[in-house]
Image: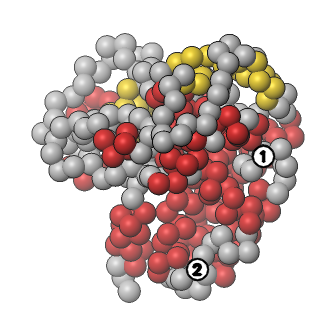
Amino acid sequence: MAVCYISGIGFGPSPTFQYSPNRTIPFSSNQITTTLLPRTKALSCFHHATTSVQPTFSFHCKTKTHFPFRPPRPASNKPTTISSAMSSGYVQEDLPPALDSTSDPPPIFDGTTRLYISYTCPYAQRVWITRNCKGLQDKIKLVPIDLKNRPTWYKENVYPPNKVPALEHNNEVKGESLDLIKYIDSHFEGPSLFPDDPAKKQFADELLSYIDSFYKTVTSSFKGESTEAGIAFDNIETALTKFEDGPFFLGQFSLVDITYAPFIERFHPFLLDVKKYDITLGRTKLATWIEEMNKNEGYTQTRCDPKELVESYKKRFMAHL
Ligand SMILES: N[C@@H](CCC(=O)N[C@@H](CS)C(=O)NCC(=O)O)C(=O)O
C-alpha cells in the first residue's frame, strides 16, 4: 500500500480537483490511499497522479506551465519566500541562502538530517528532487553550499571529497548522487521510486548505467556535429517506448527519470540555442516526457532558469571557440 499525500486546499482561478480523504485509488500494482497533508508535502506525489488520476489533479498542470523553474535567488543573503510562485497558485519551499567561506557551519551531527547541495549542480539536483518527490522537505534539511567560495569547514568537518551532494544522516555523511537517491528512497518514508517488477528493475539498472555514457556522448558532440548527440537522444526515445503504462522511463515515474532530468534540462535549451538542434523534433516520447516532468513540482522546484543554464554551458563548453 502506497500513501499518496494530497492537499485539501483548492487554489488557482478555478480549482478543478476533488478528493476524498482516506479514499483508496487503484494505482498500478500498488494502491494509493489519499491522506490530507499541507500543500507543500502534497505536491510531492503529483507525478504518480499524472498517469492514473490525472483529471483529479489537473490544476497542477495549468499552474506549472506558467512557472516551470525556480527564479534566481536574490543577491541578498536572506532566505526568501518565492511570492511569484505563490501567486501562480502553488507554494514553493523557502530556499535558504548558499553558505560560503564567511558562513558558520551548521551544528553538524546534532541529529538533523542534512542534504548538502549546490543550487546549480545537476548531481545534487537529483538528490534534491528525490527528497522533494518523497515529501521529505521537513525531514531532510537543505544546506546549499557556494562551490565557488566554499567554506573550509565543509571539507574539514562534513565531506572530505569536498563535493556536493552529500547527505548527513545517522551521524554519517555519504556522497555520490546515484547512491544517495537509492539510499533516500529505501531509508525514508514516502512513495517508493524504484520498481518491484523484475523487468522494470533490470531496465532501471541498465538506464542508470547508461547515464555516464549518455552524458559523455552528448557533451563531446558540443564541439562538432550533433549527429552523435542525435544517436544518444534516439536511445532515450527508444528507452521511453519500452513500458507503456505511463510516459516515464519505467512507465511510472522513478529514480531513472530523476537521474536523467537534470541533464536533459541542460542539454535541451543549450543544443537549441547553440546548435539550433531541437532534441524533441521527431521524438514524441521525449517531448512528452519533458512535458510530464515539467508538471512534477518536486522537480520544477529544483530547476534553474534555462537562460542561465545556457550561459553557464557556453562558458564551460564553448570558451575555447
Ligand atoms: N559523481 C558525483 C559527482 C558530484 C560532482 O561532481 N559535484 C560537483 C558539482 S556539480 C562538485 O561538487 N564539484 C566540486 C569539486 O569537484 O571540487 C555524484 O554523482 O555525486
Residue labelled with disc 1: 246
Viewer-nearest residue: 139 or 149: 139
**SS at badge 2:** loop
Q: Residue at x 33, y 17 (%)?
A: 109
- Residue 52 % position (x, y): 76, 37
- Residue 167 % position (x, y): 43, 30
Q: Amino acid at mark 1?
A: Gly
Left or right: where 83 falls relative to 61? left
Residue labelled with disc 2: 277
Q: Residue at x 41, y 54 (%)?
A: 304
| Crowd around label 1: few <14 · some 14–19 · many ≥20 (10 Å) | some
Q: Nearer the viewer, mark 2 or mark 1?
A: 1
Q: Amino acid at mark 2?
A: Tyr
Above or below: residue 234 compared with residue 318: above
- Residue 96 % position (x, y): 28, 35
CA–CA distance between discs 2 and 1? 27 Å
The part of the image, by quadrant, that contains residue 182 is top right
Q: Earlier in the sequence, mark 2 or mark 1?
A: 1
Q: Is residue 262 visible?
A: no
Q: Which mark is residue 22?
A: none
Viewer-nearest residue: 62 or 44: 62
Q: Is residue 272 visible?
A: yes
Left or right: where 43 falls relative to 210? left
Q: Residue at x 52, y 30 (%)?
A: 10
Mark 2, ligand 1, within 8 Å: the answer is no
**SS at badge 1:** loop
Q: Residue at x 48, y 72 (%)?
A: 270
- Residue 173 % position (x, y): 42, 27
